Image: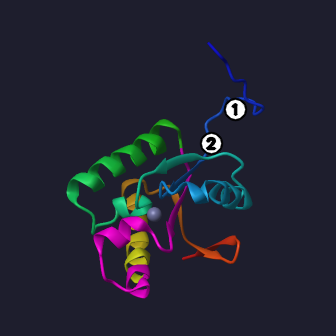
């Protein structure tokens, strides 16, 4: 048996922030950086393909139900106070769902879905602070635009 010991110390307290974003691993570090920039050194994460799309009213009932149950579990169980919903440009989830739609049309859908997801979370948890961000790659960097 081989063991691996992390350099990172275990944090006893749960983070107060939750990031909901796409599984796309190319953005993991950038999302952590954004959260740190927003004042959250540690974060819970909820990642599935499409991310916040799965909390939006345009998603099927079953998808929305399981995602919102997972979000509520973290909000209540881990005493989450801040949620950051992040959609990203060129998301495969949207490209598969809406084949043939232009990038601009898909972006408009994503922004509407972000607003819808935010509304659903705020309705379920009125004291939660919810922010929405749109991520795009500019050159070699990842840019987040608050919505
Ligand atoms: Zn994606």
Bounds of the magenta span? Answer: 80-107
What's the image's color scheme?
rainbow
Vertical comparison of 55 with 88: above or below: above
- Taking 71 as reference, is 13 left or right? right
Residue shown at the point (70%, 58%) measured from the top left: 33
The reply to whether the C-beta atoms of the residues labelled 2 and 1 are less than 8 Å apart is yes
**Is 107 rendered above or below residue 114?**
below
Is disc 1 placed on a helix, strand or loop? loop
Image quarter for ligand 1 equals bottom left
Q: Is residue 90 visible?
A: yes
> Residue 106: x, y in percent?
39, 80
In the displayed structure, does residue 66 sit left or right of residue 140?
Answer: left
Percent coordinates x, y for residue 12 in the rendering: 67, 29
The residue sitting at 61% across, 36% down in the picture is 14
Q: Quadrant of residue 137?
A: bottom right
Q: Which percent across, then down, holds residue 40?
A: 69, 52
**Residue at which label 2 appears:** 15
């Amino acid at each position: 048996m081989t063991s691996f010991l992390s350099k990172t110390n275990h944090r006893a307290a749960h983070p107060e922030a939750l990031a909901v974003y796409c599984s796309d691993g190319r953005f993991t570090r950038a999302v952590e950086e954004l959260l740190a920039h927003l004042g959250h050194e540690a974060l819970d994460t909820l990642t599935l393909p499409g991310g916040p799309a799965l909390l939006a009213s345009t998603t099927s009932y079953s998808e929305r139900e399981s995602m919102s149950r997972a979000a509520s579990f973290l909000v209540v169980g881990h005493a989450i106070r801040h949620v950051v919903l992040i959609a990203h440009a060129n998301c495969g989830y949207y490209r598969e769902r809406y084949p043939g739609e232009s990038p601009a049309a898909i972006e408009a859908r994503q922004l509407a879905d972000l607003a819808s997801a935010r509304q659903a979370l705020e309705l379920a948890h009125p004291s939660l602070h919810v922010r929405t961000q749109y991520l795009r790659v500019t050159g070699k960097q990842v840019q987040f635009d608050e919505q």
